[in-house]
Image (cartoon, rainbow, N blue to C red):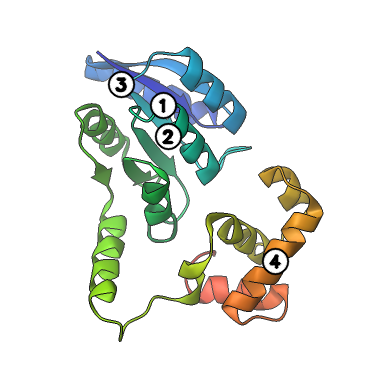
Amino acid sequence: MIRVIVADDHAIVRDGLAKLLIDGDDARVVGTAATGEETVARVLETAADVLVLDLGMPGGGISVIETVHDLRPTLPVLVYTMQSEREWGVRCLLAGARGFVGKSALMDELGDAVRALAAGRRYIGHELADELASRVERSATEARPGPPHETLSNREHAVFLALARGEATAAIAATLGVSSNTVTTYRSRVLEKLGAERNADLTRYAIRHGLIT
């Protein structure tokens, strides 16, 4: 029996995955969480074989993947999110995730992904597979460098997208658990790396590269 922890702030997702796994007769949900903090607590107190993690829940993000990977390196993390596979997939894998599935995928695919990770394999969606192939091609020739936003650190990247979506500095600081001054510092780095002068430039850049809609 595959034991699964589901971390998502939407009850309908948690309930839907629980029903899917129960109907499969070979897996069950043994714990749930709705925030990043709750996720870490469940991982520490619950014996599980797979963690299904939403990036967009309060206090979530790549830092949760890194924390879980440090605390339970043998627990495979499957990211299940509305975030772009092309933009977030590689970052999640580098942080320690073993799989990535977009919420646009069918529930059956999510079930397949859970079972793949429990069996010791990785699982990635088609868009992420294409992105990985593109990165391999770019690494093989310096004539095709990646776009500037790929040089951002995970924190810089999170601040960049939040600013591009029009979020206020204080709100970003609260989400990331840092001070407003820290967010301002990250903003300066992002502007410099992307060759931008103001937040509106970041919004145009993000839309142009398909990072936000």
Contact (CB < 8 A) between labels 4 and 2?
no
Q: CA distance from mark 4 to mark 3?
A: 42 Å
Lower position in the chain sequence, tag 3 or tag 2: 3
At x 70%, y 75%, the residue is: 200
What residue sits right under mark 2 in the picture? 69
- Which structural element holds mark 4? helix
Q: Could you tell me which quadrant the N terminus lies in?
A: top left
Contact (CB < 8 A) between labels 4 and 1?
no
What residue sits right under mark 4 in the picture? 187
The answer to whether residue 108 is left or right of residue 148 is left
As shown in the figure, which amino acid type bears the numbered disc 3?
Leu
What residue sits right under mark 1 in the picture? 72
The local crowd at label 4, few if under 14, some if 14 to 19, many if 20 or more residues have their Cα within 10 Å, is: many
The local crowd at label 1, few if under 14, some if 14 to 19, many if 20 or more residues have their Cα within 10 Å, is: some
- Asked where in the image residue 22 lies, by quadrant, the reply is top left
Q: CA distance from mark 3 to mark 2?
A: 24 Å
The answer to whether residue 195 is left or right of residue 16 is right
Q: CA distance from mark 4 to mark 2?
A: 28 Å
Which one is nearer the viewer's eye here, 60 or 203?
A: 60
The local crowd at label 3, few if under 14, some if 14 to 19, many if 20 or more residues have their Cα within 10 Å, is: many
Q: Position of residue 187 (x, y in %)?
A: 70, 66
Q: CA distance from mark 3 to mark 1?
A: 23 Å
Callout in the foreground (4, 3): 4
Lower position in the chain sequence, tag 4 or tag 2: 2
Q: CA distance from mark 1 to mark 2?
A: 5 Å
What residue sits right under mark 3 in the picture? 21
